[in-house]
């Protein structure tokens, strides 16, 4: 129960006649909430360290000389059977494999972040690229991703998509610092991956269906959008003179301190779509934004876009306006990684 609920409950029962009692109820509640959080952190620290030490024991045993010849590939199988018999669940061959990998990847226990759980590390250790692993570690800690959120971002190849949208110098910074949001262009993905909508790739669907699917899966859509987004509304009304327009989706980004308007297009983005979004942005600047807000950002999100056409359509527009693609299926990770490897190889050659 939240502190506010405790306070309201106590106040309702005592009709707010004893504020001192309400205060002590809140203090005791906070004390136990803090104690539970500290206990959970301590347990996680001990379990993570035990996993690391288990990996250390396995590696040191393998390096002992005769162990590899004697046990070979059967070592982890035998350990799994014996430890499961002695200690119960948690010692599958897969778990032991990743405990071993945890030690080999982080040979110094102090480099482990105890803000992450063993379940986080189990997923992170699936990354073959050290830069990719570093990136997801930074984002997990910074954004407090749960394991399911980490898995989704890894499946959608977030690191590769962001890395390929930056310059060569930005790839290493992305891995070491995580995704930094300093300017409007930092929040743009191309493509946005919307596989969570459940809309089949070849299905003929209406824009309103896509819009509804995004609203129904708003938590996942916010995860795809990235840092700092809060959902403000759907079909946001814009009255101009005798005309009424509607923006499909409106958000507010707390980091950039600005509104973000998204218009959805089922097919290819047309130059007229850019002009319409520019109209929306001008309205928001004059009628909606507060003095301490930064200028709004507009994203026209379509299934396809002609790069040259968009270059001419966006030319001369002062507003922060972007045209980006979305796709209803997960990207091909191997292809993205191959493109990223080329960039990284070029980076090494330039040094």
Image (cartoon, helix red, strand yellow):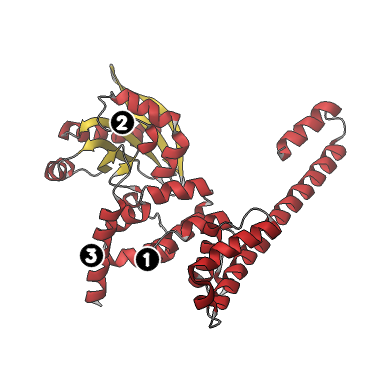
Circle 2: element type: loop
What residue would you read off at disc 3? 342
Closer-to-camera residue (205/125) = 125
Residue drawn where x is 39% and y is 48% of the image: 155
Callout 2: few (<14), some (14-19), or many (20+) C-alpha neighbours within 10 Å? few
What residue would you read off at disc 1? 173
What residue would you read off at disc 2? 200
Closer-to-camera residue (240/321) = 321
Do residues under tags 3 and 1 come within 8 Å of each other at their CB atoms?
Answer: no
Q: Position of residue 108 (x, y in %)?
A: 56, 75
The number of numbered discs placed on residues in the rendered structure image is 3
Mark earlier in primary sequence (1, 2): 1
Q: Is residue 37 above or below residue 202?
A: below
Instruction: Give the CA distance from mark 2 to mark 3.
Output: 32 Å
Q: Position of residue 131 (x, y in %)?
A: 39, 65
Instruction: Give the CA distance from mark 3 to mark 1.
Output: 17 Å
Residue drawn where x is 34% and y is 36% of the image: 261
Q: Quadrant of residue 281?
A: top left
Image quadrant for the N terminus? top right
Callout 3: few (<14), some (14-19), or many (20+) C-alpha neighbours within 10 Å? few
Q: Quadrant of residue 294?
A: top left
Circle 3: element type: helix
In-image side of 223 versus 67 (left or right): left
Which of pointers 3 and 1 indicates the residue nearer the eye? 3
In-image side of 205 versus 196 (left or right): left
**Residue found at the far top of this picture:** 242
């Amino acid at each position: 129960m939240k502190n506010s609920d405790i306070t309201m409950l106590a106040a309702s029962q005592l009709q707010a006649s004893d504020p001192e009692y309400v205060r002590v109820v809140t203090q005791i509640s906070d004390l136990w909430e803090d104690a539970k959080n500290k206990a959970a952190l301590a347990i996680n620290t001990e379990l993570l360290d035990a996993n690391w030490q288990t990996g250390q024991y396995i590696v040191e045993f393998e390096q002992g000389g005769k162990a590899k010849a004697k046990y070979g590939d059967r070592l982890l199988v035998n350990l799994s059977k014996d430890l499961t018999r002695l200690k119960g669940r948690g010692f599958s061959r897969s778990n032991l494999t990743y405990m071993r990998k945890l030690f080999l990847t982080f040979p110094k226990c102090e480099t482990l972040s105890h803000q992450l759980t063993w379940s986080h590390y189990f997923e992170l250790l699936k990354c073959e690229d050290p830069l990719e692993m570093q990136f997801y570690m930074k984002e997990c800690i910074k954004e407090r991703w749960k394991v399911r959120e980490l898995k989704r971002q890894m499946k959608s190849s977030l690191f590769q998509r962001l890395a390929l949208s930056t310059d060569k110098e930005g790839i290493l910074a992305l891995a070491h610092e995580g995704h930094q949001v300093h300017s409007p262009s930092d929040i743009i993905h191309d493509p946005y991956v919307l596989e969570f909508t459940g809309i089949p790739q070849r299905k003929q669907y209406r824009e309103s269906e896509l819009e509804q699917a995004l609203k129904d899966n708003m938590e996942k859509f916010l995860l795809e959008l990235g840092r700092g987004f809060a959902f403000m509304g759907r079909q946001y009304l814009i009255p101009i003179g005798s005309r009424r327009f509607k923006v499909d989706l409106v958000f507010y980004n707390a980091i950039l301190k600005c509104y973000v308007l998204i218009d959805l297009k089922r097919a290819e983005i047309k130059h007229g779509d850019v002009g319409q979004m520019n109209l929306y942005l001008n309205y928001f600047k004059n009628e909606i934004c507060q003095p301490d807000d930064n200028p709004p950002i507009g994203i026209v999100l379509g299934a396809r876009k002609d790069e040259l056409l968009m270059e001419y359509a966006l030319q001369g527009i002062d507003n922060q306006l972007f045209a980006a693609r979305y796709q209803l299926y997960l990207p091909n990770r191997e292809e993205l990684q191959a493109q990223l490897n080329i960039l990284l190889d070029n980076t090494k050659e330039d040094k």
